[in-house]
Every structure is written in C-alpha cells, then in structure tokens.
Image (tube, coloured by chain):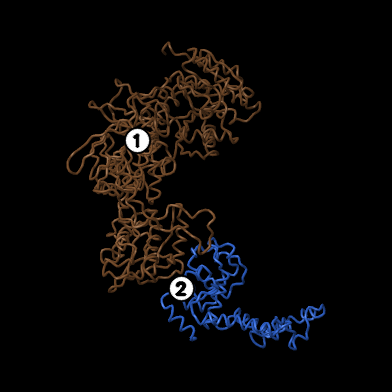
Chain colours: A brown, B blue
Amino acid sequence: MAADKKFAGYLCTGCGIGDRLDAKQLTQIATREGKMAACKQHPMLCSAEGVQLIRDDIAAGSATHIMIAACSRRAKVEAFSFPEVAMSRANLREGVIWLRPEGDEHQETTQEMADDYVRMACAEVRFMTQPTGSGEQSLNRTLLVVGNGVTAMTSALEAAKAGYGVHLVCDEGELGGVYKDLYKRVPFRAAPVGVSNARTAPLPQPEDPGVAEMIAAVQGNPKIKVHLNAKVTKTSGAPGRFSADISVESGSTATENFGAIVQATDYKPYDASQLPEFAYGKSPDVVTNFELERLAKAANGGPLKRPSDGKEVKAVAFIQCAGQRSDQEGHLPYCSGFCCTESIKQAMYFKAQNPGCDATVLFDDLRTPGAAGEDFYRAGQQAQVTFSKGKASAVDINGGQLTVKFKDLILDEDTAMDCDLVVLATGQVPNSGPDPYAQLAVDEAPTEEEKAAARKALEVAPPSILNLDYRQGTDLPHLKHGFVDSHFICFPYETRRTGIYAAGPVRRPMDMKQAIDDAAGATLKAIQAAENAARGAAAHPRVGDLSYPTFRKEGCTQCKRCTVECPFGAINEDEQKYPQFNESRCRRCGTCMGACPVRVISFENYSIDSIGQQIKAVDMPDEFSEKPRILALACENDAYPALDMAAQSGGQISPFARVIPVRCLGSVSLSWITDALNSGYDGIVLMGCRRDDDYQCHFVRGSKMAAERLSKVGDTLQQLNLEQERIQVYEVAITDVQRAPQIINDMAATVEKIGMSPFKF
Amino acid sequence: MSDLNTAMVERYRTNFLKEVEANVEEGEWVKMCMQCGVCSGSCPLGKFWAHPPQEIFMMIRAGKREEVLSSDSMWMCTSCYNCIVRCPRELPITHIMHGLATYAKRLGLVPQNQPTAKFAQLFWDNLMKKGRVNELKLGLALYFMNGFGEGVKTALKKQKLGMNMMKTGRMNPMEILGGHAVKDLSGFQKVIQKAQELEDARIAQHGARQGA
C-alpha cells in the first residue's frame, strides 16, 4: 500500500449503536485488525459537529481513506459526502442492531456481526482509491435527433429551449412523419374540474392537429438545423463525444459532433394488406385509420365521401384491434394504445360532417388512455356514436354495399351490419433499426422452433437507423416486438446504449400526446447525459459515479467476454483486440468485471479485491463452534434496500449472515464464490433482480449474465465435494421486505440441516 | 299491431335509438351507457329479468325494437334506485325503465298477463274513480286479479288480518260501497283531463321530445 494513504475510522454510537454494541471493542478492531491509524467515536456522527470532525481530519491531511461505522450506506448520504476521499461504510444500524433482537442471549452473536462489518469495511477501504473522472469528454451542447415526426420535432424544440443546438435528421422530403395527414387530433386535455356527468356537459372535442405550427416552429428556430432526405450513415464515439455522419440523398455527407442522441423515429402504420378477411385491398371502401385522415382532410369540413364512387357516407363501421392483440401470424400481438381514441375522433368526423350518418365502433375492449380519454369517449357518446362490444370476423362486399359480420359480445350472438365505409383501426409497428442481438438470438435459441423464428427475424431485419460502429452492433437493442429496449416503468428513456435515448412510439406504442411528453423527457435525459459525460460521471442508475473500468493490459487474454457481455455495448476492441472501454458509455455495473476470467478489470472504488478482501476479512469460527457463516451478495439497487427496509420494519436476520452489497449481480466474480467456499463459508446467497423479458435489473442484462455464470457453479461445488444447496441465487424485488431476510434465514436453516462446511481453517 | 306502433316503425325505420330518444322519458341518456354492467349487477331482481338494464341499452343501440318493447324486463323494475345510485355515468336508469314500459304500453306491446302492467292498470282505474286509492277495493281486485278461485283462496287466507284491521280501525268495510272521494273530485278530474290533453298533443307529434 502506498505510503500516502492515511486510513481513518469513525464510529458513530448514536441511534442505539453505543447501547447495543461494545464500542470500545469495535474501535479496537478497526485499529488493530482493520489497520486504521485511528478510530474516533462520536455520539451522533451525522450531526454538523460529527461531520466537522471528519472534515477537519481530511483538511489536516490525516485522512485520505475513511471508514465510517454507522448506518447503512444508503442512509445519511448527504451528511457523509466526502468526494475528496475514498470511503467505506460499515452498516451497524440497519445491518446489525435493527435486524437483531435485544437480549443477553443474542448479545454475543450480534456483537460478532458488528465486529465483522467493521473488519469488512476496513478491508474494503484499504483496496479503494478515490475515483476521479477520466476527462475523456468535454461539454458538447449539441444533440442529434433522428426522426421525422411530432416526437422528433418536440425533442428538437425542447432541446433548443434548453439552450442546446440540434441537428434534426429526417429521412423524408418534409417534416411531419406519420401525423403529416392528420385532419384533427384527439384532445390533449380532460374536461375542466367541475364539469358534471350531465348528458349535455361540455366535453373535449377533436382539435386542430397543430403539426403545421410545429413544423414552422422547428424551421424557424435558429438553434435547429434540419437535414431533409438525410440518413445517419455512421455514428461513433460515446456520450459527450459522439460523431455522426449525416448523408443527404443528393450525395453530400457532413460529419458533426454531439453530446447525446435522441432516436425518435416513431412507428410505421401496420400493413393492412395482411387483413384479407376485412376485404382490405378488395374494396376501396375499406380503409385504415391512417387513410381515413386523408379522406377527412380531402372533405375539408364537408361530408366525407366513399373512395369508390364519391357517394356521401351514410353508415360507417370502425373495426377496432384490426390485426392487433392477436396471436395470428402477421398480426401484432400487442395493443397499440392509440387506435380507440383515434376511432372515437374519426367517428365524430362523420357525426359532425355527414348529416344523419350512423357511426358504429366495434370494439373488444375500449381503451382510452391519456388525460382526455374517458371524457373524450363520453364526447363520442354525446355525438351519438354507437359503441358496440363486438368482434368483427369478416367484411363482405355486396355490390356497392359492405357488410360487417361480427359477434356481439354483450348480446352474445353472431350478427351483421351494413355500411358504406369500413375503417380498420390498425396499429403501430415500431420504426426501429435491426436488433443487434438478432444473430445472438439465433445462436442461443434453445429449440429448433425458436431458432427458426429467430432466423426469420434476422432475415426481415430493417435497415440500420443509427449505424453505430459499436462492437455489439449498429442499433439500439430491442426488447419485444421490435420495440427498443427501455424499462417502461423505472427508466423509460434509458436504452441499452448510453447517451442514446429513445422517445415516442419507437420504444412502446403510444398516442401523439404521450409521444410529445415522451420527447420532452427523453430530451432532458439526453441533455443530462451530455452534461454528466462532460464531468466523467455516470448516467442512470449510478448517477454521478466518477469511477470507470480499467484493465491490466499485461494480464488480458483477449478472450472478448467483457466486450460481448457488456449490457450496454460500451466496450469496443482496439486494433490489437484488447478491450477499449468507452468510459462515458459505461453505466458502472461491473458486468465486465464479473465476466473477466483473469480478473484484470477493476474500478477505482469497486474491484475484485474490494469485495474479495471483505469476504476474507470475516472472522471464521471453527467447524465445532456451531456458528456458521453465510455470505449474502445483494444487489445494491433492490435486494440491499429491501434488507434495509426489513430492518426499519422490525425484520430479523440470522446473526451468521454477512451481507455485502454489489453493484449488480452481473459484477459478481466467480472467484469470490470460490474464495468464500475455500475460506469456510457454509452457505452463499446471491440476491439479484428479476431477469428476462419483464426484467427489473437496473443494468438490463446484469442479473441474466449472473444467472448464466452461476448456473455453472455447481461444478465448483462438486469439485470441493460440497452440497449443491450451499449456493442459492434469488430474484429479489425492492418490495420483498419480508422475503429478503427470509431467504437468508432459509439458508441458515439449510446449513443447520446439512451441517457446517468442512473448509474452515 | 296498433296503428301507432305501425306509424312509429315507419317513422324510425332504421334507428330505434332515435325513436327511444324522441319518445321515451329520459331516452336521450341511452347513448351514454358505457356497458359496464354495474346496473345489472346491482339490481336485486336482476336474475328474474330476461334482459337486465345494460343489455336493454345495448339492444336499443343494436336496433332490436320488437324484442325490447315487447319484453317484460322493464316491467320488473321495483324502483329501488340501486342502479341510479351506482351508475358511474349517472344515467337515470329507473326512469328509463319506466319510460320504456310506458312507451310499450302506449304502443300496445305489453306482454299478455304481465302482472305489473295489470296491477298498474288496476291502480290507475281505482285512482281515477274518486281521486284517491280505495285500498279495500284495490286489495280485493288484486286478490281476484288472476281468477276467481285464487281470489277466494287468498281472501280466506287473509281473513284474520282483515278482521284485525277492522277492529283497530285500519279498514272501513263500508268503503266497499263506493268509498269516499277527494274534496274536489271534479277539480281533480279536470287536472287529469288537462294532463291527458297535453300528453296526447305530444304523442300526436311523434317525436317531440318528452319533458323538453
């Protein structure tokens, strides 16, 4: 250890720590075993006075590495914020005294628990260095926005409002995108508070679409440069230093630098020619909801006419969920979430413009998301639109008339209705690039059937939109049905490519208002990413973390596991096939560290040693002491907070457990497991987040990677002649407040049943 | 089929909903039903209805004119107002049911021997005679509503109750001889006559909105 490291320990005796635990013994452990130069006590360390005590030592130069034994590392983060030094925290409050019952019979084991946590925190801080940003990026206040429509235009306008420059890349000859032909839009606001339920209450009506105004605002904004008929032909770099080639159809290419990117490529209307049962293509009087907007625009306030013979429409039927919410081949399995309100709006066109026209909406479930949703439905009912819960099965053509056959789901009968025009409420197909993992999906598909499906997806892959020169592929990874992967509740805009934000229907189906709100959110996240990158700080979820992964080149075997397994495609390969960490693309999950078989990857404040030494620092009683040791590696995002909350709500945990928070289960190195087994731990519990399609992993793939690696841990156990039950992997949610400690207690029970590990030295 | 019914069929050939809106009390509300089914679930007699209210609203919108108007469902309504209280759209469901019943009666489409309809007629006829309800006559008429034999049986069964009511002065047997009238019977009859004229004038217009 370098001579300039000054280790200092601080023990808080507040919140009952001093009453429940032997403070003198803890300070002795910190100084003698933990090798802290000194360990100061304070009755309330998080108070101004206590914090000043630490600040004074740092200012005097007697503390560069500090160990604080007090509450959980998740508590009092504002008070214990010393960015100029390396810091570890021993969790004596939530981790020990709040999870253990009082009483003499428990005193010995509870004290041992606290002793170990102090040892562990001392060991951790000895192997930490204070992170400083890489300085790889400077602040670039320009965004690249890709897309033609309302989402992209909103994003550009929001960025410009925030003082950012924007290059808007539109692959068509004019702006407007899918809503270019919109006649009117679904209202954005609900009826004001206080509007009654009365039959004649004033309710929101279809509004002017506002697209032309938006186009004018974009074109008139000096901060926005619009590239029409253009494509992004190459994107390289990282947040804060993206470089993109913008190629115009005419042949010229401009290279621009960007702080961050927003992909707002919206959706493509579903191809209704896959709906022959509804006579689409057979009769010009069967149109999609998108085509109807054009008819309405052409009518220009007058009666809407049939495309076939120009006759005024006297009866119109809307078939909801056309080619949607269906498992049938070629149909969309999901709800597009905008077609119900669109159909209400379009039916109201007929009610307003075609005197005496009957308009019937055949729906299965009428879903009206958005602020105006329910009020707008009522507005449609007021206008005497007929809403019929019915499932349409076919559209027949009899001369000039159309007949819609449907099953009335309320009256439970097969029936039919005649009409002049049929409108198919078709859905949204995400306008995303090819999934970079499509090939991987083929390779990894477990069954031949799934393999064939994956191969087909690969064959029909769309052209690239971003053309990233990343090791892991050209575009944003997908989750389901071609939508760009982003956690739809917890972090909706974060994609799996840091600094590139997906906005609008490209990440999930949504209507125009939601897309506009979405664009504002994604743009702010993009600005935040550019500014974080300039400071060398991480984006979500370790926001502000200055540490970044580095590797010991001489130890690297160029196995490529880090470059392949990084959930964010952050790692490229250099000419010699060594990993090239793009620090600002990195989310600091440590999945690369967990993947590295030769353990050469580390962060300044998180490494194989910073955890490995904690595992080793635990005092290991001998085999006959009846005091087993259980190691719990808990994800700091969900499982560790769940344990903290269990402590707050009076939960209890086995006194033999030693919990270590990890950034992500994906960062768990198998060497920690082997070391733990070799040094005599009796059981190991790994607590990560839910994985796969409905994942809750903050690093998307981290817990999946961990599960895959740990599926092979059985071999290690077998080699050591140990029982398989000694290692368990669990998916834990932040709400599992009762379950999280129970999992650990179950392991304690298991160990009691199968006996102690023979590997105690 | 009554003449009026034929006329209505002619007039609203394609749109039963519009016919209901124009002719049924509170019929303008039918289009506002969102088919949640809370009314049907709340109706204490719902299981005895051939078509609970939710279904009736759907049938009106589906143009099932004959089935709705000749149904006995709306006659089953006991005016408990559960549905009105619970309807999230605040539809006056009870009133619509009575409105439909009234309209069906006017068109001559009430099912034969519908007991509620029969009782309503007895009540009305009884009331019209003296401007007040003669309970003794109404009760007896009710006993004999479904035939002489059943009337005698019911009367015998209720004999003791009747005696007790007489003893305590709750029932005057002399009322059977005609009974007493309201103070100004001719005034009452004029009121009713005027109301009937107004109603007839509205009906003659077929489609003038009721109560508008």
Q: Quadrant of residue B49?
A: bottom right
Where residue A536 appears, x then y in whole percent? 37, 27
Residue at 36% over, 36% down: A526
| Furthest-left residue in this view | A251
Q: Is residue A717 above or below residue A300?
A: above
Q: On the image, numbered disc 1 is attached to which residue? A: A164
**Viewer-side residue, A198 vs B186:** B186
Secondary structure under the numbered disc 1 in the rendered image: loop
Q: Quadrant of residue A470?
A: top left
Q: On the image, numbered disc 2 is attached to which residue? A: B18
Total marks placed = 2
Where residue A181 appears, x then y in whole percent? 30, 55
**Viewer-side residue, A684 vs B88:** B88
Viewer-nearest of discs 2 and 1: 1
**Viewer-side residue, A204 vs A367:** A204
Secondary structure under the numbered disc 2 in the rendered image: helix
Identify the chain of the residue marked 2, using the numbered disc in the image.
B
Q: Is residue A156 left or right of residue A7?
A: left
| Furthest-right residue in this view | B167
Distance from Cα at disc 2 to Cα at disc 1: 57 Å
Quadrant of the image containing the N terminus of chain A:
top left
Where residue A741 appears, x then y in whole percent? 54, 35
Q: Is residue A672 left or right of residue B177?
A: left
Q: Is residue A484 above or below residue A306?
A: above
Residue A621 in sight here: no
Q: Is residue B87 left or right of residue A726?
A: right
Residue A354 in sight here: yes
Tell me whether the residue at label 2 lies in contact with that at label 1, contact meaning CB atoms closer than 8 angstroms: no
Residue B170: numbered disc? none
Q: Is residue A603 above or below residue A521?
A: above
Residue at 52% over, 39% down: A736
Identify the amino acid type marked 2.
Lys
